[in-house]
Image: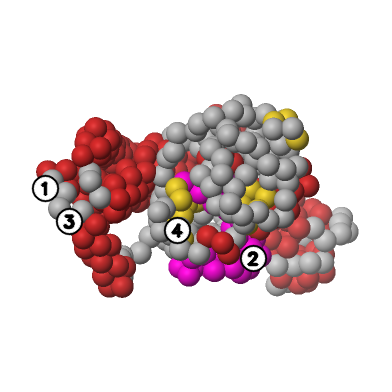
Amino acid sequence: MLSAATILTAGLATTVVATPQAEAITMQEYQQKVQNNETLKAQLAGVNEQLANVILELSDLTENQIPAAQQAAEDAEQNAQQAQQLADATNERLQSAKQDKADLEAKIEQTGADYDDAKEEVANLARQSLHGSTASDVMDVVTNSTTTEQFVDKMQSEAAVTRSESNAADDAANELSTSMNRKERLTAIENRITKLKEEADQQAASAQQASEDAAAKQASLQALRDKGSAAREQLESQKSSLTTQQAREAAEIVAAKSQIDSYNTQNYGGATADPSAGGQQQVSNGGSSAVTTPSTPSNSSGNTGSASGMNYSVPGSCPEGSGFCYGHSTGNTVGGSAYPARQCTLWAYIRRSQLGLPVGSYMGNGAEWANTARSLGYLVNNTPHVGAAVVFARGQSVGGHWTADWQYGHVAIVERVNADGSILISEGGTGFSTFPAWETLSNPGAYQYVHY
């Protein structure tokens, strides 16, 4: 009668920023995709039809097919994990029930199947009341009493105090209708085991199916990425045949976005960290980015608050994790482990490391990267260059597309400076469907850039 049921609740670790759920594409987004495709076609006017089709196919893979497949794979993986967790929880309950049965069978072997444990417990309470014991939690559970006097009153007879302990226990058990002998309890446990076994088998089968579905979705995603890699290689081999600047730039941007997407096949982990150290921010919109091969530096400027006409190549000679590079401390003490998963700060760390550029472990929230970099001796100005970290102030418009978080700001990486002065950036953030994402900004002079 007094045995307690334990409820196991699986808790989720609290996160600073919730990842938005995937939603169906809106009409505005659809129209924008159509417009982007038409713009790309226009840029490829006069290009060999076969090569133009390769570029259009690669663009569609990167912009549409791969993101959709990636979302489907992530959803399937989440479903598989949830199904397995449910199956594991039910199996744990099944094992607990089996243990209860084993414990009860051991008691039956000792004192018999007809021994009334409930009656014995009430007898103990009666003995406590007769001997003037104080209120107890157990007594409160049984009769909702908080004092010995209330307990006695609920026996519905003042005579209960003067009866023998055995009679008092018998009256209490009958009145509360809680008596169940061991034989009855054993039957109840066996019935529960049968039901749990059925549930566990069904859930195990569901978990297995969900796991297979997730694997299939992941295979489909990889197939699309392999197709994209093949198309990108074909484009690179034929890019020299493009005769117009407009067509060459369009092809390079498409290839660059495809290359950046390939980083999604790598596991960047995401050790949770103190938000003040890692810089968490959520963004609401965005695209993806490009890859440029690092080259040898042509010069190295000092730290200035602003500059114009700067001309240098991506240095790319700072080993990943370096604590000192280009004549100053990089601030790199623990690698990228301090930055939260999928956030813009983590991607900025990863991409700078890939390009062989210095980057610190505790640059702060996105908006703080410029000031932190200055304090460490980095060159910071308002001139974009490939590999530079572009810093967005709190609440600052990001190319007119969306607004940087009012508390954290945002940080991204310059992947390409286009002929028209616009820049292609790669960026992280839980609001994007992929990690990393990319977009083109037409007003680069509005932001600060951390160089090296």
Q: Which residue is mark 2?
A: 394
- Of discs 1 and 2, which sits in the foreground? 1
Q: CA distance from mark 4 to mark 2?
A: 22 Å
* Separation (CA) of disc 1 from disc 3: 9 Å
For marks 4 and 1, the one nearer the N-term is 1
- Would you say 193 lies left or right of 384 here? left
Q: Residues within 10 Å of mark 4 (few under 14, many from 20)?
A: some
User: Distance from label 1 to label 2 (Cα)?
Assistant: 46 Å
* Element class at badge 1: helix
Q: CA distance from mark 3 to mark 4?
A: 22 Å
Mark sitting on residue 45 = 3
Residue 240 highlighted magenta (yes or no): no
Who is closer to the viewer here, 326 or 353? 326
Q: Is residue 175 above or below residue 315?
A: below
Contact, mark 3 vs mark 4 (Cβ under 8 Å): no
| Residue 263 coordinates in the image, percent (x, y) | 42, 38
Q: Which residue is mark 4?
A: 422
Q: Earlier in the sequence, mark 3 or mark 4?
A: 3
Q: Relative to residue 49, is residue 158 depicted above or below?
A: below
- Give the alpha-carbon distance from disc 2 to disc 3, as whole Å: 41 Å
Q: Which residue is mark 1?
A: 49
Q: Magenta part of the protein: which range?
A: 388-415
Q: CA distance from mark 4 to mark 1?
A: 28 Å
Tell me the SS state at disc 3.
loop
Picture quarter with the C terminus: top right
Of 327 and 391, nearer the camera is 327
Q: Residue at x 72, y 55 (%)?
A: 305
Q: Residues within 10 Å of mark 1 (few under 14, many from 20)?
A: few
Return the disc, 2 or 3, that comes first in the chain's sequence: 3
